[in-house]
Amino acid sequence: MEEFDCLVVYVPTADADGLRRAIAEAGAGRLGNYAACSFSTEGTGRFLPLDGARPAVGTVGEPEEVPETRIEAIYRRVERDAIVRALVAAHPYETPAFMTFPVDVSLPPEG
């Protein structure tokens, strides 16, 4: 069976649809006869831009809070590099917050 991973990424809510579209076009969210599958939840992202940062939102040295969306999607492990490249290209932040980890999408044997 093919190996799958899960992508979790946090993005400003206003940019969530574009990011979902970009990672889906790169292959994220394909499972069986379905494509562009993902799950999203809303929350608040918090960060402090440090010296040398070029924040898309906020000011260096000042804490910031942004309405963000957490997007989760599975993908075939062999497509990781293409999906992460698409994520970075579509994400508005200088340093996108994301993680990937292995997942088991196998079904139990029948019977």
Image: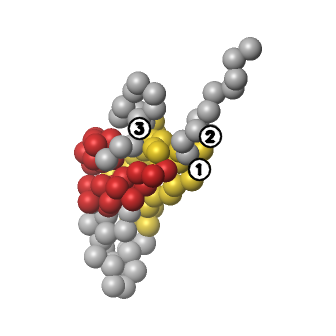
Label 2 crowding class (10 Å Cα cut-off): few <14, some 14-19, many 20+? few
Q: Position of residue 74 (x, y in %)?
A: 48, 42
Q: CA distance from mark 3 to mark 2?
A: 14 Å
Q: Residue at x 57, y 53 (%)?
A: 101
Q: Amino acid at mark 3?
A: Gly
Instruction: Give the camera-side residue of 33 and 70.
Output: 33
Q: Is residue 60 above or below residue 98?
A: below
Tell whether label 1 touches label 3 (CB within 8 Å). Answer: no
Q: Residue at x 62, y 40 (%)?
A: 104
Tell whether label 1 touches label 2 (CB within 8 Å). Answer: yes
Q: Amino acid at mark 2?
A: Asp
| Residue 29 tag number | 3
Q: Residue at x 26, y 55 (%)?
A: 90
| Residue named by callout 2 | 104
| Residue named by callout 1 | 102
Q: CA distance from mark 2 to mark 1?
A: 7 Å
Q: Which of marks 1 and 3 precedes in the sequence?
A: 3
Q: Which element is circle 3 on?
A: loop
Q: From the viewer's perspective, tell me whether residue 38 is left or right of residue 22.
A: right
